Image: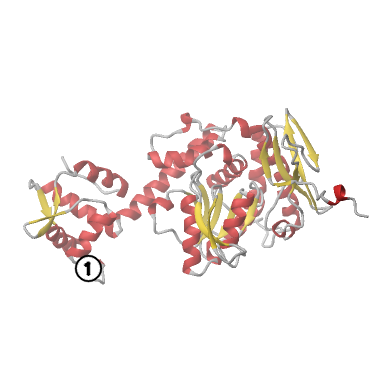
Amino acid sequence: MTNDTNANIGPPRVTPTVSAQLPDGGLVELVHDPGEDKTRLASYHDGQSLIVESIPTSSGVPLVPVSARNNLIRHGVLLLPERAEPFASTEGLVHGIEAYIARYVDLTDAFQRIASAYVLLSWVYDAFNELPYLRFRGDYGSGKTRALLVVGSICYKPFFASGASTISPIFHTLDTFGGTLIVDESDFRMSDEKAELVKIFNNGNVRGFPVLRSSATPQHTFDPRAFSVFGPKIVAMRHSFDDPALESRFLTEDMGKRPLRQGIPINLPDAQRDEARELRNRLLWYRFTMLRSAAINTAAYDERLSPRTNQIVAPLLSVIGDANLRTSICEHMAGAEKQLRVERSGSPEGQLLDVVLTLVGKANAAHITVTEITDAFVERFGKEYERPITPRYVGHLLRNRLRLMTYKRHGNFVLPGTQTAHLRVLAERYGVEASLG
């Protein structure tokens, strides 16, 4: 005879957990023991860390670790610490990170320190609302993929998406696990995949901007779902993005500009994986002890940088105690802003803005016709273009790229002379000299 009471008892409900902040102020992180190939939970409270199989909750549904049989963990696509290991000082931890990177990657001294600071930021990124991205840019054989692997291996919950055949797993993994996206842009050869990747970059540096995608249901319908993509990202690329706004989010090292430094191993030794795991253990302790106190340091803002760049880089500066390193990073960003303005000034929009500023500076009229602007543009820059420069094309650049207002007057489109303030802002942004009075 069947016992009806026992028959109705199913397996206990549990919550598979990757990371959690508990009501009592405790922190929980998923850890993985590669020797036993087993996952557990590392809990931290009041300066003590324990490795446990589960954590009870007030709801009666305990927190348990995501299984080590998870495909991403089993294949080493997602890397985790083994435990939380205390260290003597943050300064010593940073020196250890720098030494590890220097052993396996040839970076400039300045960017080696920036990359080390970015590793720290990745472990407390969820204390901030905006984040910069880290990028290694270069041609084939420049070492950018090596840099991705070495630096990415010690970031917070790094997810190596380079081998993904489609973009969909990236959305699901970021939404489920969070952590740091490590991606080689060259692995995504189809234009639609790269467009989806750009969506992640556009939405992923500011909290609260998920990407909406349709997921198939068992009933063969499509259900709109929001995927959280906020978090640190490290990217390898051959070129730059066309969008200046997206470009401004990257801290970039141009690889392969000098001979490889002697002592860098051609092939990564097994010791690199062990070193990376040991550093992840110490960095987990850094997260446990620093997450609650991490916050924007407004004193780190630099007047040499634009407000947008200060906003992007402030979280990185806020985790750095070394004033010299903060200065070095600000100098790097100031140089990057200058280079971006140089590149913008040579773009069609920058050249057109230069023409407009020249005409506005000389004219006393209340408006300038688009035809006049076109004629001046063709005279100065027409030989640089294979396509014909027409008033229609110029009007498109004025309205849609430079966001300048035009209107029709006596059958001609004209640019009113009342946009001086906007022109000054554009001149600063594009690095074009303005003489507007």
User: Residue 151, image x and y in percent?
Assistant: 62, 51
- The residue depicted at 65 percent of the width and 40 percent of the height is 95
Q: Is residue 274 left or right of residue 240?
A: right
Q: Up-down: is 20 above or below 179?
A: above
Q: Up-down: is 54 above or below 218?
A: above
Is residue 381 visible in the rendered structure shown here?
no
- The residue depicted at 69 percent of the width and 29 percent of the height is 24
Kind of residue sitting beneath label 1: Lys
Q: Up-down: is 53 above or below 213?
A: above
Q: Nearer the viewer, residue 136 or 391?
A: 391
Q: Is residue 79 left or right of residue 327?
A: right
User: Residue 283, image x and y in percent?
Assistant: 68, 41
Quadrant of res 142: bottom right
* Badge 1 density bin: few <14, some 14–19, many ≥20, Cα 10 Å: few
Q: Up-down: is 180 above or below 55?
A: below
Q: Which residue is mark 1?
A: 383
Q: Nearer the viewer, residue 216 or 52?
A: 216
Q: Name the quarter where the C terminus is drawn.
A: top left
Q: Is residue 87 left or right of residue 368?
A: right
- The residue depicted at 44 percent of the width and 44 percent of the height is 333
Q: Nearer the viewer, residue 339 or 80?
A: 80
Residue lying furthest front = 1
User: Residue 429, image x and y in percent?
Assistant: 31, 47
